[in-house]
Amino acid sequence: MGDAVVGIIGMGDMGKMYARRISKAGWRVLACDLPTKTAALEAEFSDNNNVSILKGGYEVSRASDWIMYFVEAKNIHAIVADYGRSTKKNAIVGGQTSTKAPEIAAFERYLPADVDIISCHSLHGPGVDPKGQPLVIINHRVQRRQSADLVKRILSCMESNIVHLSAEEHDRITADTQAVTHAAFLSMGSAWHANKQFPWEIPRYVGGIENVKINLMMRIYSNKWHVYAGLAILNPAAKIQIKQYSDSVTEIFALMLQTKREELTKRIHDARAKVFGQPRDDDEELLLQDDLLDRFSLGKKPAVRHPNNHLSLLAMVDCWSELDINPYEHMICSTPLFRLWLGITEYVFRKPGLLDECIDTAIENVSFRSDDLKFTIAASAWSDVVNSGNMEAYREKFAEVQTYFESSFVEATKVGNEMIKTIEVGLRSRKTT
């Protein structure tokens, strides 16, 4: 493919995926991780002649033409401080962290002036096929045109949809599309854990929208905590949005408890009008349809569908409305998880009759009260952790819930992957505004 050498510092799941894809396309890859992982990585890539495992970041930095840092956002500053000064003259440096502000700050501080800074971010997890998925490229400091051309050629092997953004635009969009979405699913998991529930064993949580909620909750908790912590805690825009989501959950739940039907209905309908426009008499334009929602379940589908007030979804649209966020605006660089979250949210708010059923359930049906209380407490607790900036508190809270559900991760991952694959194919293309 070319004479350029690609360096990868940090061989976690995403680093390995990039190493395999890029080397398969014919590029030479030099990679490293912690010294304790070197032997295992050498064995894992022993049959790949285009990937060489080196001892550390100094060796990778000195010999590579484009060096990518695949490290936790909270560690990016210290790691670039160690290896940045060893960067090859006139090389290119970038990173794959989900929050670009600390990454770019570290690059600007520790990299030599002759180094170009071109970063990227694949908006999906390592287990998702990158073909057709959004891939953000950030041309932050480009002194040589050939640098941008080289990065684009190397990344073409991903077959992703390239989106060019600034670091600031990237962080705002990822806050819009990911931070609150993650907070909602983290809160669901915390609430089910607090109630000692496996939701797929409870009839009212099986089928349709509930399948998507459960599978995506399990998907998040089966991954590594630092991916979500970095995005939430190190992105200033994310803190604001997560706090608003918690406020929306609390305020809507209070209206439910006080059975203030008129006030609740006005608030929810106003939010719908602002985010989705006026209601329609059909569901032709919905991202998701009935036949897709019922197909992926970890439990046995009940004979009768149980109505749900869908507090988590009501609060999501209220949050978007309060923050003047148009969720369709960033579809071009959204994650599969966000597209599914938007899909089920839109389904509730735009499918004829369903939103009014949710409001009726919220006022008249007390069967979800205990679950909704735990969800409200969980949303507030996650917001407090994020706003405290305490990474260790985030890790501990995440790990507690992760341990509770981990025995079901294998099956959930299998079902979740098939769900995402099938529903992604079924999603209709939407115009961005």
Image: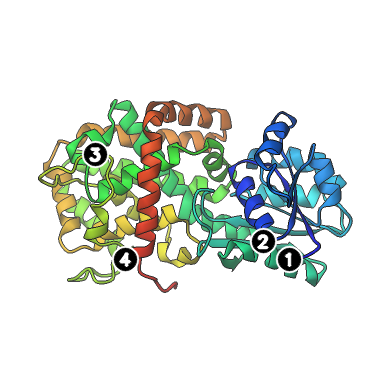
Which numbered mark, 2 or 4, is in the foreground of this view? 2
Q: How far apart are marks 1 and 2 (CA)?
A: 7 Å
**Nearest to the observer: residue 390 or residue 416:** 416
Residue at label 4? 276
Going from N to C along the chain, the mark reached first, 1 or 2, is: 1
Crowding near the residue tagged with mark 1, few <14, some 14–19, many ≥20 C-alpha atoms within 10 Å? few
Residue at label 3? 299
Q: Is residue 422 visible?
A: yes
Q: Distance between the residues labelled 2 and 3?
A: 41 Å
Q: Residue furthest front?
A: 47
Residue at position x 54%, y 51% from top?
Answer: 237
Residue at label 2? 25
Residue type, mark 2 in image: Ala
* Vertical placement of residue 415 versus 346, above or below: above
Q: Residue 85 carries which label?
A: none
Q: Do the residues labelled 1 and 2 touch (CB within 8 Å)?
A: yes
Q: Position of residue 196 (x, y in %)?
A: 29, 25
**Nearest to the observer: residue 151 or residue 99:** 151
Going from N to C along the chain, the mark reached first, 1 or 3, is: 1
Residue type, mark 1 in image: Met
Residue at label 1? 1
Q: Where is residue 133 in the image (x, y as percent from the top left)?
A: 51, 61
